[in-house]
Image (tube, grey):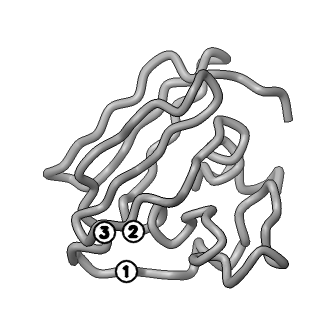
Amino acid sequence: MQNLAPLEITVHKNSRIMTIKWADGHQSEYPFGLLRAGCPCADCRGGHENMRPEPDPAVYDVHLPDSPATRLDQVKAIGSYAIGLEWADGHREGIFSWDYLRALCPCDECRGKI
């Protein structure tokens, strides 16, 4: 997958969705629960031995309820290649690269590419 930066990132706290508009015209909508379930940090992945550049397909079957763990407080740029998400429970270790986020897109088109 090519490294393509988003044109726009919007966080909708009421609907609990983060939207990314990509340079190729695609739009991804990420429920907060999916972002938290798909956190790419070593703790959330179960250790460094489970680190991969793509999301674990099992994250799409995880349904996390509204809680501090799934309330997105902040989105911060990390260089020009990623964002960091900070959750209301204080978790902020995951670095979501553009490639990882595109692979995490829950739409049928993108999930067919995993």
CB under 8 Å between discs 1 and 3: yes
Q: Earlier in the sequence, mark 3 or mark 2?
A: 2
Number of residue marks: 3
Q: Is residue 64 left or right of residue 24?
A: left
Which label belongs to residue 80? none
Residue wearing tag 2: 33
- Give residue 89's position: percent from left, percent from top: 26, 72
- Which amino acid, mark 1? Leu
Q: Is residue 33 left or right of residue 89?
A: right
- Give residue 69's position: percent from left, percent from top: 30, 74
Q: Earlier in the sequence, mark 1 or mark 2?
A: 2
Could you tell me which residue is drawn at 21 percent across and 53 percent down? 15
Disc 1 is placed on an element classified as: loop
Q: In the rendered image of this protein, does residue 47 appear above or below residue 5?
A: below
Could you tell me which residue is drawn at 23 percent across and 43 percent down? 12
Which label belongs to residue 64? 1
- Quarter of the image for residue 75 reads top left
Q: Point out the frontmost of discs 1 and 3.
A: 3
Which label belongs to residue 70? 3
Indicate the quadrant containing the C terminus: top left, top right, bottom left or bottom right.
Answer: bottom right
Q: In the rendered image of this protein, does residue 44 appear above or below residue 15?
A: below
Disc 3 is placed on an element classified as: helix
- Quarter of the image for residue 101 reads top right
Q: Callout 1 environment at 10 Å: few (<14), some (14 to 19), or many (20+)?
A: some
- Give residue 28's position: percent from left, percent from top: 52, 39
Q: Earlier in the sequence, mark 1 or mark 3?
A: 1
Disc 2 is placed on an element classified as: helix
CB under 8 Å between discs 1 and 2: yes
Q: Callout 3 environment at 10 Å: few (<14), some (14 to 19), or many (20+)?
A: many
Could you tell me which residue is drawn at 63 percent across and 62 percent down? 40
Q: Callout 2 environment at 10 Å: few (<14), some (14 to 19), or many (20+)?
A: many
Q: CA distance from mark 3 to mark 2?
A: 5 Å
